[in-house]
Image (cartoon, rainbow, N blue to C red):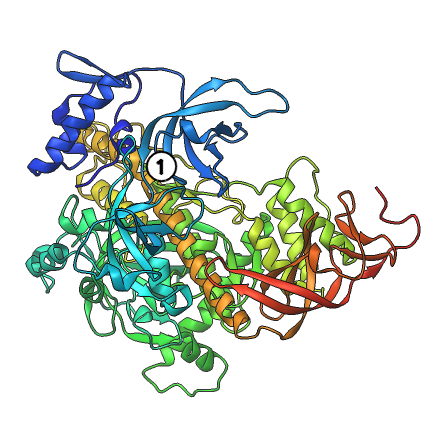
Amino acid sequence: MEFSIATLLSNFTDDKSVAPKVLEKKLGCQDQSNLQKLHIALEILEKMEILVKDRGRYRRIQEELVEAKLRCSSKGFCFAIQEVEGADDIYIQKSHLSSAWNGDRVLVEITKEGSRRRSPEGKVRLILERVNPSVLARVRRSEYGYAAIPLDDRLLFELELKPNQEDLAEAVDHLVHVEVLRYPLGDNPPIGKVARVLGSDAEDAADTDIVCCKHDLHPQLPEAVLQSIQALPTQISDTDLEGRLDLRDLLTITLEGNSETNQKSFIENAFSLEKTQQGEWLLGVHITDVAHLVTPDSQLDQEARARGTAVFLGDTFLTIIPEVLMEQCSLVAAQERLTLSVLLTIDEAGQLLEFEIQPAVIQVDHQLSYEQAQSLLGGHQSADQDLEPAVEMLQGLFFNLSPAVRAQRQRRGAFELSMSEIEYPYKDEGRLGAIIVSSSLPLRSLLTELMVLTNQAVASHLQALSLPGLYCVQGEPDIEELQDLINLGRNLDLDLQLEDEEEISPQDYQDFTQLFSKSSAGKVLTHLLLSTIKSATCSSKPGFHFALALDTGYTHCTSPLWRYADLFVQRLLLAAFTQGRDRRSTRSKERVHLTHSSCHGKISWNVLPPDLQQELDSQLTHLVAHLNDRDKLAQDAELDLQGLKKAEQMKERTGDVFSGLITGVQSYGFFVEIEDLLVEGLVHVSSLKDDWYEYRSRHSCLVGRKNRTAYQLGDQVQVQVKSVDYYRQQIDLVTVSGGSVALNGDLEE
């Protein structure tokens, strides 16, 4: 398995010495090539005085080096951005980059302390991780043959191209995908090879190809991984059923999307619902058991871990495991499937009373789309006798249970966003971190309420059993980012106020969304509010989740086909149930039920065997950082594709006039959100030919000296699309009409 210096160094904690053999195992160095790379890396780190060797073991030298990520500009200056909240950015001169590139993770030595007005300065001591294994570039002839000029002007270099099967002469002035064969070495330039010619320019290339190449995403799984599936069983054996709860006679249904795309054919969740004698609801959320087939450290597992999360690029989706295996795990009707079933007892008010998590086997009775379910509930489609029990279940789910659970969530201050449906297969809050309510698919958001509750229950169980856990946390938004939106709302006569001026709460966002629903600009305001919400991240410790208003811990467990974190949590639970100790010692008579919430607060011993606990703790050390990096990459790629599609759409409409809302004002111009399309463009101040405009920072507006025309937050304007830079996704607009009038004395600094 390939490893980075960052991954290698993450194994050195608390000033402890580590043997090379331990590192070989943890880094998956099985072949001779990776073993050699590991020992070379250890020798170099020793010479650089990052590690010290003592009696054959290595230890990290504790020195004042800062871990950071490089952010460079096209003008050649760079800053090292620290991950520690509130830490200063460190200025790095071009001569002190040590061949590091934009985006690389680095160790920085501070050479000059900062002051109140100046950033600290430093130099790169070590490149921890390269984030540009390939680049998008344009080919040109050079004095030594052919060179590749990266399209990203923050990458301050050219690559020397090695001849390969591509005809470089024909690739001149074309957009190409270049694999980096060697990074800069001393005064020698980086070397690459053309992996693929994408087109004459960015607009000639397929947008998904651009995104995959730009973010180094690989649509195809390695052949060795695909071949490894052949050794997996295709049928459930009697041995597989041992120790599992038999729920095959339980009425279960699945609810999936409306489209017939392949993405929707992989079904990982099924549902059951019964009413107990006490009048409570017994909800079953049945999650396909992927951990049964994807065993730890297998080729399948290593590839799934490396990918981290699926990436959804329109009709193209990049999976973490092969589609053949996804089909084998899919909960299709009339087929027996192994599951991890979460059985929740909920009262009529939506309160979770108790739950159990059981390895189980089910057989789905009915496979419905949201449209079918909506039609059945609305009486638009008559149910045959076979479907009547399923319709009764749907009524209980969506008319009684889900609204009650939603009311409980809203009562603690959590909020949801009214937006168009997001095309993700997750049934929980998914990539956005907040629940989306769509008028076109109301059942989807109601089902999300139940999935979020399931994730909460599993998180509480991980904590109660003191298992090494993967939790989902989300910090509160930055107040500076929210302030512009508050100012915009006030200019639209919306009373946007924070309960506490020093701290943002989920209740504030709930209040804002309620005000937005009454505004004619609600669609734009909700879109802007979403941009202020921080991405949810993985953590090995339970923490606060802002959008869900949860401070008791939250995890993801319902999408093991698409997210490795969910698969890992599933594996943790199954390990606890099969290998865990249900009593303090063999002499103890009192046992607890490890699968039931009744054990919470009663466990005062380590449930897992010590070796397994230590191994899982060790894995979490670098798994958390890796999964966060992969999730960030997936988000960037998906947003990149959306941006390209919007740019393409607007390029076709160059010259058209649209209504828009001014959402940001700077000294160089103002940003306009085209309301119908949710596309943002810039009106540059140089395009305002009718007057000389001055920037009023206190009022966030531009004011004409003579005509007193003002362009400020919240103003409605008519704009024309002037030009579009497709690759950079930059849309230039010019005003046709709109703005406001600044009265004498108004809007002055």
Figure quadrant of the N terminus: top left
Instruction: Return the x and y of residue 501 as percentages of the image width and height.
Output: 71, 38
Quadrant assignment, res 687 = bottom right
Residue projecting furthest to the front: 143
**Where does label 1 land, which residue?**
464
Instruction: Return the x and y of residue 554 as percentages of the image width and height.
Output: 42, 44
At numbered mark 1, what does the secondary structure look like: helix, strand or loop? helix
Instruction: Return the x and y of residue 433 as percentages of the image width and height.
Output: 48, 52
The residue lying toward the viewer, choosing from 190 and 262, is 190
**Residue neighbourhood size for the residue with mark 1, other residues' Cα within 10 Å, grouped as few (<14), some (14–19), many (≥20):** some
Relative to residue 77, is residue 675 drawn left or right? Answer: right
Figure quadrant of the C terminus: top right
The structure residue drawn at horizontal position 11% and vertical position 32%, both measured from the top left corner, is 35
The residue lying toward the viewer, choosing from 95 and 498, is 95
The vertical placement of 15 against 597, above or below, is: above
The structure residue drawn at horizontal position 20% and vertical position 27%, both measured from the top left corner, is 41
Quadrant assignment, res 42 = top left
The structure residue drawn at horizontal position 62% and vertical position 74%, both measured from the top left corner, is 655
Residue projecting furthest to the top: 55
Instruction: Return the x and y of residue 276 as percentages of the image width and height.
Output: 39, 61
Amino acid at the residue labelled 1: Ala
The vertical placement of 4 against 559, above or below, is: above
Relative to residue 186, is residue 612 drawn left or right? Answer: left
Residue 54 visible: yes
The structure residue drawn at horizontal position 24% and vertical position 66%, both measured from the top left corner, is 330
